[in-house]
């Protein structure tokens, strides 16, 4: 069975600094997608970034980038130039063939 | 475009009662999901569907049932409600399994 693990329940970072959130997953499949979602206090889930397992190049979306290590089954999220609006729960997610599962989440606080 | 609509937003149930959480999407998405999110925790997959007439169990299906008679609707049925089912429930949909998932606003359910 596929599993997604986020080992950092809480993290904090100073405004304008860089922070990395960790995620590992377990699967025997070779074709899958990985995602990072953000959940602010409003509870709305927002897609941050996604990565296809077959692509070696790490995905980037503005200040957000990933470090995808397929052999190690690791998928970390780097947030550069952190902003107060980045304060939220961040969830790593895995989808293979339609079964979308999430990690436990990391609560990120950006401090002024 | 309404997106994913969940009803009701809040509900209090007594132990042993039953209810149906409604979810409908108007984006012609094939994939639909039901999750529960306990306080400070991640999203646990209850059931999912890859198309009309097809449903499958997720990580925590016990105590729940679903049906998918149309592309638009994916209701979640709780039979014999228990306090352990107190949670926030999210419905989500995707066009394809490798695309962005869109979420409803959530249903806060309390079983007393």
Image (cartoon, coloured by chain):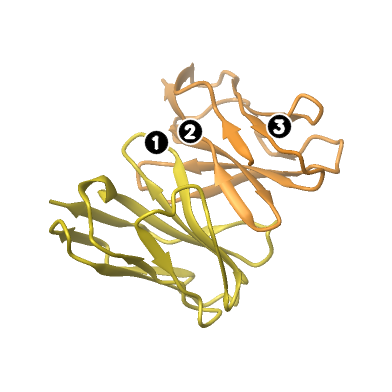
Chain colours: A orange, B yellow
Q: Report x, y in % for residue B29.
A: 60, 72
Is the residue B83 above or below the residue B67 in the image? above
**On the same chain: label 3 and label 2?**
yes
Mark nearest the camera among 3 and 2 is 2
Question: How dense is the environment of label 3, judged by Cα within 10 Å: few (below 14), some, or many (20 and up)?
Answer: many
Question: How dense is the environment of label 1, judged by Cα within 10 Å: few (below 14), some, or many (20 and up)?
Answer: some
Mark nearest the camera among 1 and 3 is 1
Q: Report x, y in % for residue A34.
A: 68, 42
Q: Report x, y in % for residue A74.
A: 71, 27
**On the same chain: label 1 and label 3?**
no
Mark 2 secondary-structure assignment = loop
Mark 1 secondary-structure assignment = loop
Q: Residue at x 57, y 46 (%)?
A: A101
Q: Which chain contains the residue that carries disc 2?
A: A
Q: Which residue is mark 1?
A: B41
Q: Quadrant of residue B64?
A: bottom left
Question: How dense is the environment of label 2, judged by Cα within 10 Å: few (below 14), some, or many (20 and up)?
Answer: many
Q: Residue at x 51, y 41 (%)?
A: A38
Q: Which mark is residue A66?
A: 3
Q: Report x, y in % for residue A45.
A: 48, 50
Q: Residue at x 40, y 65 (%)?
A: B65
Nearest the eye: B80 or B22? B80
Label 1 and label 2: CA atoms lie apart by 7 Å
Q: Which residue is mark 2?
A: A105
Is the residue A39 above or below the residue B76 in the image? above
Q: Are marks 1 and 2 in contact (CB under 8 Å)?
A: yes
Q: In the current view of this chain or complex, which residue is farthest to the bottom?
A: B70
């Amino acid at each position: 069975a596929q599993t997604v693990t986020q080992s950092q329940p809480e993290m904090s970072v100073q405004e304008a600094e860089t922070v990395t959130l960790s995620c590992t997953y377990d699967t025997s499949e070779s074709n899958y997608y990985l995602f990072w979602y953000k959940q602010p206090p409003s509870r709305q889930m927002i897609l941050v970034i996604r990565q296809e397992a077959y692509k070696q190049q790490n995905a980037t979306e503005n200040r957000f980038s990933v470090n995808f290590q397929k052999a190690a089954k690791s998928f970390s999220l780097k947030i550069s130039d952190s902003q107060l609006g980045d304060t939220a729960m961040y969830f790593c997610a895995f989808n293979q063939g339609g079964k979308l599962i999430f990690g436990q989440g990391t609560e990120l606080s950006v401090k002024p | 475009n309404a997106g994913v609509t969940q009803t009701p937003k809040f509900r209090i149930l007594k132990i042993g009662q039953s209810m149906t959480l409604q979810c409908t999407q108007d984006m012609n998405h094939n994939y639909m999901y039901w999750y529960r999110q306990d306080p400070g925790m991640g999203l646990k997959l209850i059931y999912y569907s890859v198309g009309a007439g097809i449903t499958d169990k997720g990580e925590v299906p016990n105590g729940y049932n679903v049906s998918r008679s149309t592309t638009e609707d994916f209701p979640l049925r709780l039979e014999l409600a228990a306090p352990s089912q107190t949670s926030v429930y999210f419905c989500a949909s995707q066009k394809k399994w490798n695309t962005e998932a869109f979420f409803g606003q959530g249903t806060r359910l309390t079983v007393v």
